[in-house]
Image: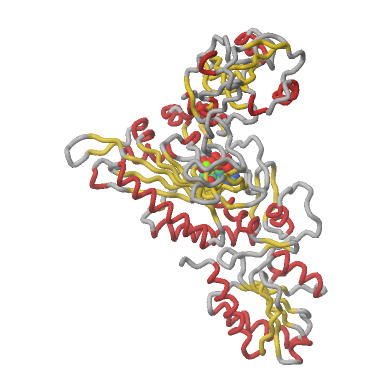
Amino acid sequence: MRWTKQLIPTLREVPQEAEIPSHQLMLRAGLIRKLGGGLYTFLPLAFRALKKVEKIVREEMERAGALEILMPALHPREIWERSGRYEVLRDVMFNIKDRQDRPMVLGPTHEEIVTDLVSREIKSYRQLPVNLYQIQTKFRDEIRPRFGLMRAKEFIMKDAYSFDVGWDEADASYKAMYEAYERIFKRCGLRTKVVEADTGAMGGNWSHEFMVLADAGEDGIVECDQCSYAANLERAESRPGGASDFDEAALPCETVPTPGRRTVQEVAAFFQSPPARLIKTLIYMADKKPVAVLVPGDRDVNEIKLKRALKARELALATDEAIEQATGAPVGFAGPVGLQIPMIADLRLKGCKGAIAGANQNDAHRIHVDLERDAKVEDYADLILSREGDGCPRCDGSLHEKRGIEVGHVFKLGTKYSELLGANYLDVDGKQKPAVMGCYGIGVTRTLQSTIEQSHDDNGIVWPISVAPYQVEILVLNMQHEESVRIAEQLIKDLEARGVDVLLDDRDERPGVKFKDADLLGLPVRVNIGERGLAKGVIEIKVRKSPDLQTAPIAEASKAVLGCVDELWKDVAIS
Ligand code: ATP
Ligand code: MG
């Protein structure tokens, strides 16, 4: 392909709207263009790369035994109401009506749709297991679409759904998908970290996320420095230390005036004590009822864990008004002693003595609080956000924080959806049983951009060979020089005959401009053909990821380029 026949609108300037390198580079290299918030057009080069990612995904899905289908993106709302998820996802779903005024939604995911299909088509254990997947556009009205393809309102997902006769069989399906994901990301040239994850709106029993480690990642994760434990911060545990006893003398609880001291910092400073000695008391509304949540003064509540511990559908911090009503004091003075609403405390507070807490009165705190002696805590659970330096919950190691981009997510769903939507089968014993499900998503467009986020330098993209729009760029320094053009054309012929995609920069631009664009575009191998080299009987080869410039005799040009290409395939080969 010739550059002058392609559409590659490269930009010199870094576009203002783009905050992270991969987004900037996709715009600058002429890969994508924005239509509106979270809506992007794929220009030809990005489309080529996307097709390559999709091909890898398809090959690995087929290899794992999944069958490709295509479901509608437009759904009757009724099916989402039937599963109860319309309530959970209504803010994220685009709601529309057809001309008969029937409520419809644009699919953010397809558990309901596929389960409905299976409930109609699969009747017997003989038809199981089955794993159905599609590569399709999803729609989500994200609160903050950003970072280009990373968080878009419309994006392409590969979603697969497995149906098995029992739990062990479902585990095997999960494992097969997990391994397929490892292969897919490796083949796309991505280094990923698998972490334990929250199951969120999907529900289900267990899930893992595939994370691309990157500073720009929106997800916080922790990993242990000694064992394989790694988890999304949303669900990460940490080893609780022993209970804190700050008060060996076991003094009785006492109320002390603390005028105007509300925050942990203010109160800790007032008592000249470490923040950890404080009991932070937060009032939440869980399914519209107030609940007091106690955590050590130096820690933050993990609302996802809290929601799970309370088995609440809805959870939000209480309003000032509700706090005053629940505690009888203005905001900033809540504490466990004498509080009349249900209380749940973090595990680390179990047995704590000599703590400082709000007194449920204006401008006052209590000291020498012995939580078990002085308050009625209903339940203890792991409620805090893990952080750098916490102990690993599985071994003696320590946890370290990293940022990650979630490119894939696998869930063990169990029978939640099959029960709700009637995906039952007739077992050998003649009994009706719900199929045991798993679901598995890959953000295909997010994966594509992640390859750039993880592989670029100051000058531009450094494409992995497997997803690069073209694998080789030939740069003819002067298109008026006939011999250069002839040699370039021969080389293209040889390479294309060997299945290598080639882009020829045939523009009438100065070499400097072409070199800059070549770096920006980041195709894996570049060949420079110019008069000066040809006079010496050589062409130049530059592998984008390495700093060295090699030369090869004209007669061996294609052999040398193919050698570089083969070498690069080793980076993305499955061992
Ligand atoms: P996130 O936590 O990033 O919002 P999610 O957990 O809601 O994602 P899933 O429902 O697990 O996403 O979707 C499967 C995959 O689809 C994700 O792993 C991610 O790669 C991709 N994905 C999800 N939302 C978006 C989006 N708004 N834009 C692009 N890709 C997305
Ligand atoms: Mg997810």
User: In the picture shown, does residue 386 fall above or below 570?
Assistant: above
User: In the picture shown, does residue 140 fall above or below 262?
Assistant: below
Q: What is the x, y in percent for residue 77?
A: 48, 30
Which quadrant of the view contains residue 512? bottom right
| Outermost front residue | 249
In the image: residue 104, left or right of residue 172? right
Q: Which quadrant of the rendered structure holds the N terminus?
A: bottom right
Residue shown at the point (70%, 88%) measured from the top left:
538
Residue shown at the point (36%, 38%) measured from the top left:
414
Comparing 311 with 201, the one in front is 311
Comparing 175 with 127, the one in front is 175
Comparing 91 with 503, the one in front is 91
User: In the picture shown, does residue 301 fall above or below 33?
Assistant: above
Report the colour scheme: secondary structure
| Visible residue check, residue 168 | yes
Q: What is the x, y in percent for residue 307?
A: 52, 27
Residue shown at the point (55%, 23%) measured from the top left:
352
In the image: residue 376, left or right of residue 220? left
Comparing 435 with 9, the one in front is 435
Count of marks overlaid on the render: 0
Q: What is the x, y in percent for residue 440?
A: 45, 46
| Outermost left residue | 429
Residue shown at the point (52%, 50%) measured from the top left:
210
Q: What is the x, y in percent for residue 260?
A: 77, 15
Which quadrant of the view contains residue 431? top left
| Visible residue check, residue 139 | no
